[in-house]
Amino acid sequence: MAQPEDLVSRFLGADVRTLIMRVLVTAQGVGGMTGDEVVQFLESSFGAFQEGQRADGWKWNGPQLNEALRELASHRMIEQGTDGRYVVTPLGRLAGQGAIEVESVMRVVDCLSGLQTEDITDPVLLVAAQVTTELDAVLFPINKRSTQKEPQAWLGELQRQRVASGALRSMQRHVIEQHTATLRAKKAVACLYYVTGTEMNEIERVMTQFGGSFDGAAGPIRSVASRTADMLPVIARVGELLRPGLDLSSRASRLTVRLEYGVGADAVDIARLAGRDFGRGDYRRLSAAGLTNAAAIETASDDLILEQVEDDADKLRVVRLFAETVRLRERDKGPIVSLQPYQS
């Protein structure tokens, strides 16, 4: 019997480009909308009604909406037909329906659109993830007083990883504060270290070599890797839409596994089977012992495998199961028997 809370719309709190994309996605079935129709739709919302009640005479900012439409069109997210109606492109549908900010998709488009197909490598995908608003929101240690050494170190590392200059320049755009670009580069480098299977103590030592953290960096490193893994499927899809014919699904899937479990390329397949039943140390030791492929596992003794997985019998069974699964899969991929000529 208590008095219910007032209903308050959060519609107007969203970025205007996000609002436009959501409106146009809903209008796909009617052939799109003109700019005026978009405004009419927005003005008929509950949020606009409440704002009008609060501030008499309130209206949407027409120039702001037109600028948002221009931005969305320049980033290939909407198209305007000869009838003046805006329709959503496949890239726009990805932004309008996905769990990623429209602003982030636009930044990824800026990052990848100027690159050649061969430039879109794993390190570039990791850099593209760091320019999103979602990764900007992930806290990471940095020594703000190091205005020369720290920025140069992370940028130099990305250059050594042959990250295309266009992708590197994208980290300088849409900066929130002076150190935003350095933080983005540092997070990308942290991800690169993490997916090599490097020991966490060593990654922490590298990440804190210029100061800025007194209680370790393991938590932030894992947070950045996890959030980057969340963003990779959308980033890969943006790359595919920008480059028709480019298939990044397999690469993105492998890189996601490596970010989730902190493993090198050789341990991806066994990590897919074992998942979080194995710790990162288990994967590191198996890799160091060369026990991440089926052939090596089949010839290895139980004692050798147990030595890498902390004498855990359950983990031994998982390793053996992995080798058996691979062997059966390869057996099923045997030569294809050609169909013989038909005989009546």
Image: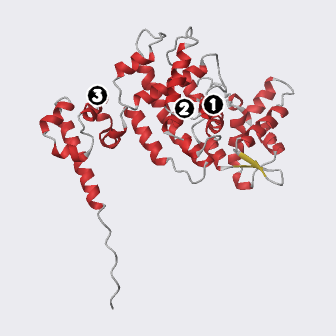
Q: In front: mark 2 or mark 3?
A: 2
Residue 127: which numbered mark, if any?
2
Alpha-carbon span between mark 1 and mark 3? 35 Å
Relative to 61, is 270 on the left or the right?
left
Where does label 1 land, which residue? Answer: 170
Residue 66, compared with residue 343, is above or below; it is: above
Instruction: Looking at the image, tell me whether mark 1 or mark 3 is earlier in sequence order.
Output: 1
| Contact (Cβ within 8 Å) of mark 2 with mark 3 | no
**Residue 297: x and y, percent?**
20, 43
Q: Where does the N terminus fall, quadrant-wise?
A: top right
Residue marked by disc 3? 281
Q: Amino acid at mark 3?
A: Gly
Q: Secondary structure at mark 2?
A: helix
Q: Amino acid at mark 1?
A: Ser
Local secondary structure at mark 1: helix
Whole-percent x and y of residue 40? 81, 41
Image point (18%, 36%), residue name? 305
Question: Marks 1 and 3: which is nearer the front?
Answer: 1
Q: Is residue 44 visible?
A: no
Mark 2: give few (<14), some (14-19) or many (20+) Cα within 10 Å. many
Q: Earlier in the sequence, mark 2 or mark 3?
A: 2
Q: Looking at the rendered structure, which numbered label has been put on residue 251? A: none
- Above or below, 212 against 286 in this view is above
| Numbered disc total | 3
Badge 3 local density, few (<14 within 10 Å), some, or many (20+)? some
Say left or right for 273 vs 165.
Answer: left
Q: Residue at x 84, y 28 (%)?
A: 58
Q: Amino acid at mark 2?
A: Val
